[in-house]
Image (cartoon, rainbow, N blue to C red):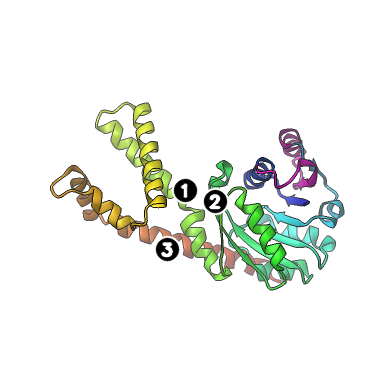
Amino acid sequence: MKISFIGAGSMAEAIIAGLIEKNICQGEDILVTNREDRTKLEQLEHRYEIQSTYDMDELIRDADMVIFAVKPKDADAALQKIQPYIQPSTFFISVMAGISISFMEDKLKVSCAVARAMPNTSASVGKSATAISFNHHVSENQKQLAETVFSSIGMTAVVEENKLDAITALSGSGPAYIYYVVEAMEQSAEEIGLDAGMAKQLILQTLAGAAEMLSSSDREASELRKAVTSPGGTTEAGIKVLQNNNVEEAFIKCIKAAAEQSKRLGQVHESKHLV
């Protein structure tokens, strides 16, 4: 299997690392390019024993999959640059937030297989939650190929494209929400007199344990929470403060706001580049 990457940032590197580690691809079958940062390409070549090129024909011609991993603001220029080389047989997957399949189809001007994948930054440690959507040109074999590739960096879920803004808000931005909670826990640990290093270890193990409980148990999160919350106990005292400060409502508003922003950013970008 030959896979080409347009864009050589952190997400492209995370996917490349997963492909190599899981033996889905050999380094010699991975090609990567970027706009002009030759030093970055050389670093990737050395680190993963892959190939790089600025020849667009070479990049796309024999690829089983072309992964488009540029910043959304650079999407229009990059799509125009590669458009002359796209063939009906090309399988094109974007990992950009907010850029619709229909927009990419319009810019590519070729009826080919196009997909959108929405990984998150946990891809860098092989723990991404990746949602994938396909257009009607994507074959069953290509769908399986996409799931295999993105399974190398975590779990995958196939969804309708109209769900991607919501998924961007929930799991795409989700790691940041967890980091925000950890920041608050670290600050509270300091204020109640705990050593920072020890507190961090305790917080990380607590998160890992809670995640494992949610994953391995058939009980809902609310049931697991209530099981820890004894009447009159320490957990109940803490939970009451969260409830009194409407923390649950704030998180719901947070995710809804992120979903609306994802939708809005896509609309703004596409409206600027319609032809």
- The percent position of residue 267, horizontal first and vertical second, equals 58, 68
**Left-right relation of 207 to 153:** left
Quadrant placement of the C terminus? bottom right
Between tags 3 and 1, which lies in front?
1
Magenta region: 22-48
The question of residue 27 being in magenta is answered with yes
Q: Which residue is labeled 2 in the image?
A: 120
> Which one is earlier in the sequence, the residue at label 1 or at label 2?
2
Residue 256 numbered tag = 3
x and y percentages locating residue 115 in the rendered image = 67, 64
Q: Say the numbered circle drawn on residue 175.
A: 1
Disc 1/disc 2 C-alpha distance (Å):
8 Å
Residue visible at 38% across and 27% down? 197
Amino acid on which the number 2 mark rests in the picture? Asn
Residue 212 sits above or below residue 49 on the image: below
Tell me, yes or no, whether the two marked residues, 1 and 2, touch with CB atoms within 8 Å: yes
